[in-house]
């Protein structure tokens, strides 16, 4: 399996964290089932190969050929169904809503086909991806498409972008009152604009940001006691720490890191 990462175009770099592509090298080259943890981001996926399966809540469904998946509040599993050919865009938490007319809250915890996001444009994009002869050409095609969508949909919302950055940079430890004080937004303004731009409330986004920080902390310090890590991550006791971890992952920390097919986003 060929996996490549690319830098976003300079015009897109403030909003897009990563552009990546994956392609099977042979007919038998498959992507095994993998668990994806909640991470507070939106990702765009374009399959020029065979679409993958998603497993969630004991259900399996075939992914659309192109779709966006919004911020998740619980884990999902993914697995290829045949020959893989995929380009994906991973946004920063403050980035995706600048590219869509559709409010992010409309596809929380689920996927939304790109036909709904860009009904008159997506067929042309997918046709171009099928015609491109190599991964680099497909990456260029997708980035040009997104550059045009940014020019059409870009919002002028510096306060909400700053609020999202503050929560993520603080790993979810800042209070809502402190976020409001730093951005000049009232609590109601913050919550309303968060739903449109991120898809959920500031409180839930803070919890997910802290959960992601916990995952990285545990990964780097597996030899440490859970009590010590819990305190460092802002929890009052180990029991609260374990409960929060299990709410998002479905596992205790010990069970979670005993598995070998779990992936979570960079901070």
Image (spheres, grey):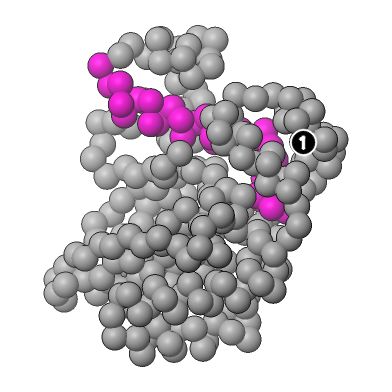
**Residue 172 among those drawn in magenta:** no
Residue 216 point in image, percent of width and height: 38, 31
Query: Magenta segment, which residues?
Result: 196-223
Q: In what quadrant of the picture does the C terminus appear?
A: top left
**Residue 205 among those drawn in magenta:** yes
Residue 38 point in image, percent of width and height: 48, 43
Q: In what quadrant of the picture does the N terminus appear?
A: bottom left
Q: Crowdedness of circle 1 by 10 Å Cα count: few (<14), some, many (20+)?
A: some
Is residue 239 something that shows in the picture? no
Please tell me in which quadrant of the rendered image residue 101 appears: bottom right
Q: Dominant secondary structure of the magenta stretch?
A: helix
Residue 149 point in image, percent of width and height: 62, 73
Tell me if residue 166 comes above or below residue 139 in the rendering. Answer: above
Residue under the image location 63 percent in, 69 percent down: 150
Residue under circle 1?
Answer: 183
Q: Is residue 5 left or right of residue 67?
A: left
Residue toward you, 123 or 10: 10
Is residue 140 something that shows in the picture? yes
Residue 160 point in image, percent of width and height: 73, 45
Residue under the image location 37 percent in, 14 percent down: 226
Residue under the image location 26 percent in, 62 percent down: 3
Please tell me in which quadrant of the rendered image residue 127 appears: bottom left
């Amino acid at each position: 399996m060929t996996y490549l990462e690319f830098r976003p175009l300079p015009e897109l770099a403030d909003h897009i964290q990563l552009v990546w592509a994956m392609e099977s090298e042979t007919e038998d080259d498959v992507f095994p089932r993998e668990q994806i943890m909640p991470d507070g981001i939106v990702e765009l996926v374009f399959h020029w190969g065979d679409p993958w399966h998603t497993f969630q809540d004991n259900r399996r469904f075939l992914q659309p050929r192109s779709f966006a998946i919004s911020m998740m509040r619980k884990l999902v599993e993914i697995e290829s169904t045949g020959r893989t050919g995929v380009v994906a865009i991973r946004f920063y938490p403050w980035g995706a809503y600048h590219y869509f007319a559709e409010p992010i809250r409309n596809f929380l915890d689920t996927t939304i086909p790109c036909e709904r996001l860009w009904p008159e444009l997506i067929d042309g994009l997918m046709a171009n991806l099928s015609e491109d002869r190599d991964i680099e050409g497909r990456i260029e095609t997708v980035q040009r498409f997104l550059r045009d969508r940014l020019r059409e949909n870009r919002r002028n919302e510096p306060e909400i972008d700053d609020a999202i950055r503050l929560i993520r940079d603080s790993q979810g430890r800042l209070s809502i009152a402190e976020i409001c004080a730093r951005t000049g937004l009232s609590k109601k303004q913050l919550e309303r604009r968060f739903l449109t731009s991120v898809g959920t409330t500031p409180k839930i986004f803070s919890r997910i940001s802290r959960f992601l920080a916990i995952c990285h902390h545990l990964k780097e310090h597996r030899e440490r006691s859970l009590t010590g890590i819990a305190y460092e991550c802002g929890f009052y006791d180990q029991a609260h720490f374990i409960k929060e971890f299990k709410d998002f992952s479905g596992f205790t920390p010990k069970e979670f890191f005993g598995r070998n097919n779990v992936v979570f986003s960079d901070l």
